[in-house]
Image (cartoon, rainbow, N blue to C red):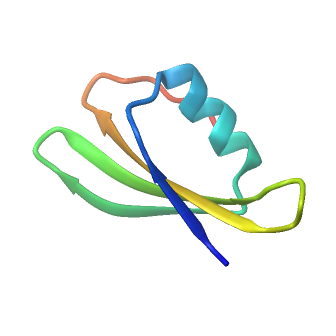
């Protein structure tokens, strides 16, 4: 079962989540923002995902 989370999050938290990711999907890139859907597996082996919006000028390291 896939669980989806949507909430405001800091750039550091986004970077941490990206490091755990099994799949990163760019859902859109419009008007100075990029929408990402990040999927990962939790400690129980269940697939999780979370959507992020990254504004222009943000620096995210993979």
Percent coordinates x, y for residue 49 in the rendering: 57, 60
Percent coordinates x, y for residue 10 in the rendering: 47, 22
Q: Is residue 20 visible?
A: yes
Along the horizontal axis of the image, is 40 left or right of 26?
A: right
State which quarter of the image contains the C terminus: top right
Along the horizontal axis of the image, is 31 left or right of 21?
A: left
Residue sticking out furthest to the bottom: 1
Please name whichever residue, 58 or 48, is drawn nearer the observer in this view of the structure.
Answer: 48
Residue at 49 percent of width and 23 percent of height: 11
Residue sticking out furthest to the right: 44
Q: Is residue 53 above or below residue 28?
A: above
Residue at 51 percent of width and 29 percent of height: 60
Q: Is residue 61 visible?
A: no
Please name whichever residue, 26 or 48, is drawn nearer the observer in this view of the structure.
Answer: 48
Image quarter of residue 9: top left
Q: Is residue 57 above or below residue 24?
A: above
Please name whichever residue, 53 or 5, is drawn nearer the observer in this view of the structure.
Answer: 5
Percent coordinates x, y for residue 4 in the rendering: 51, 61
Image quarter of residue 12: top right
Residue at 29 percent of width and 22 percent of height: 57
Percent coordinates x, y for residue 40 in the rendering: 71, 59
State which quarter of the image contains the N terminus: bottom right
Residue sticking out furthest to the left: 31
What is the tally of numbered marks visible in this picture? 0
């Amino acid at each position: 079962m896939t669980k989806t989370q949507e909430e405001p999050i800091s750039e550091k938290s986004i970077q941490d989540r990206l490091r755990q990711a099994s799949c990163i999907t760019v859902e859109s890139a419009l008007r100075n923002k990029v929408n990402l859907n990040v999927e990962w597996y939790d400690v129980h082996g269940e697939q999780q995902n979370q959507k992020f919006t990254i504004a222009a000028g943000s620096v995210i390291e993979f």
